Image (cartoon, grey):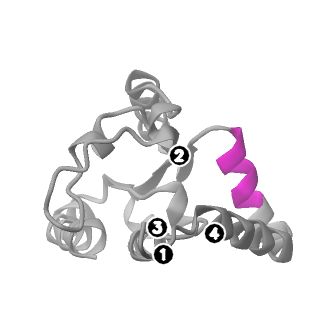
Amino acid sequence: METNYFGPVALTKALLPSMVQRQRGHVVAVSSVQGKISVPFRSAYAASKHATQAFCDCLRAELEQHGVAVTVLSPGYIRTNLSLNAIAADGSRYGVMDETTARGRLPADVARDVLAAVGGKQQDVVLAGLVPAVAIYLRTLAPGLFFRLMASRARKEQKPKDA
């Protein structure tokens, strides 16, 4: 929560008075697809990103009258070395490339889309492939089906405790 929510909120609150005074500005927050849908075994991360999404949704309504735009970027997996450099629970380097990250979007493609979204003052931008985008709509339009699919995914990903 400190990194994904409280940090961006504190920074935003520090900068907002000057934007409101000038009657212009643009708040850009990085959330995640998991700020819109929650997948198994990512509960704390998803909660922090849902909080970021909600904060920005409220802020957007509150700041519109002051000429301040709010954009929320919700990327999916991006092909980076994040999982290779991640720290495991025991403090050691994780050192494994996650399949989902390896299949993620290229950083240059994401950067291009971010620049276009921010330049166009889009409000809510999903930067992910077709499957995550469909999952977001499925969560809203058919929540029962969505949660059954997530439960099935959890059963498949569940690892034995002694593994």
Q: Nearer the viewer, residue 122 or 93?
A: 93
Sooner in the amino-acid sequence: mark 1 or mark 3: 1
**Residue at numbered disc 4:** 154
Q: What element carries label 1?
A: helix
Answer with mark 2 or mark 1, whichever residue precedes in sequence: 1
| Mark whose residue sits in front, 3 or 4 | 4
- Asked if the residue under mark 1 is in contact with the one under mark 2, i.e. CB atoms within 8 Å, the reply is no
Task: Tell me the quarter of the image containing the C terminus.
Answer: bottom left
Mark pair 2, 1: CA separation: 16 Å
Q: Distance between the residues labelled 2 and 3?
A: 11 Å
Label 3 environment density (alpha carbons within 10 Å; few <14, some 14–19, many ≥20): some
Is residue 135 a member of the stretch shown in magenta? yes
Q: Which x, y percent locates residue 158?
A: 57, 69
Which mark is nearer the camera, 2 or 1?
1
The residue where tag 3 is placed is 60
Distance from label 3 to label 4 (Cα)? 34 Å
Q: Mark 2 points at which residue?
A: 122
- Quarter placement of the N terminus: bottom left
Q: How many labels does the image show?
A: 4
> Residue at horizontal 48%, vertical 75%?
54
Q: Can residue 109 be seen in this view?
A: yes
Amino acid carrying mark 3 in the image: Arg
Q: Is residue 107 above or below residue 24?
A: above
How far separated are the C-alphas under marks 2 and 4? 34 Å
Q: Position of residue 2 (x, y in %)?
A: 21, 75
